[in-house]
Image (cartoon, rainbow, N blue to C red):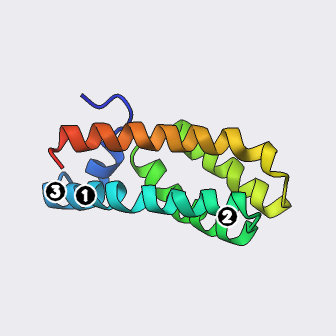
Amino acid sequence: MALHYNLAKVYALSDNDPEFVSEIINLFVTEVPMDLEQVKQGIEEKDYKMAYSFAHKIKPSLDLLGLNLAYEDILQIEAWSKTEGKKKEIKETFKSVANQVEKAVKEIKKDFNL
């Protein structure tokens, strides 16, 4: 049972096409954790452009899968990278996103036998 994600938008977008839904889920499970690592690296190295571009890339996936809090957090990371803030200002926000994505990925893998 989906506690950490919501596929309502995915089903609406796909007209309930199970193949499309499966594709979106697989992309989320494989791509988003890798992209998050790039955000983390950008934050740690103060590579603001890198942090921004990968946060921006992840943003639609978080919205599509109903990870609303993670979506709000990723918006904060984008804003932080634009203002080139201090690392300590954004570390907890990043941890929050990473934690939510990790829970969603784990749950999706279990729910869809991936």
**Residue at the image position 73 percent from the left and 64 percent from the top:** 45
For marks 3 and 2, give the CA distance: 36 Å
Residue for badge 1: 14
**Horizontal and vertical percent position of residue 35:** 50, 62
Q: How far apart are marks 1 and 2 (CA)?
A: 33 Å
**Between residues 107 and 75, which one lies in front from this camera angle?**
107
Q: What residue is pinned by disc 3?
A: 17
| Image coords of residue 88 (percent x, y) | 80, 44
| Whether residue 108 is situated above or below residue 45 in the rendered picture | above
Contact? badges 3 and 2 (CB < 8 Å)? no
- Label whose residue precedes the other's in the sequence (1 or 2): 1
Where's the N terminus, which quadrant? top left
Q: Are marks 3 and 1 in contact (CB under 8 Å)?
A: yes
- The three-letter code of the residue at mark 1 reads Ser
Q: Quadrant of residue 106?
A: top left
Task: Please give the name of the residue rendered at 48% of the width and 38% of the height, measured from the top-left corner.
Answer: 100
Type of residue at label 3? Asp
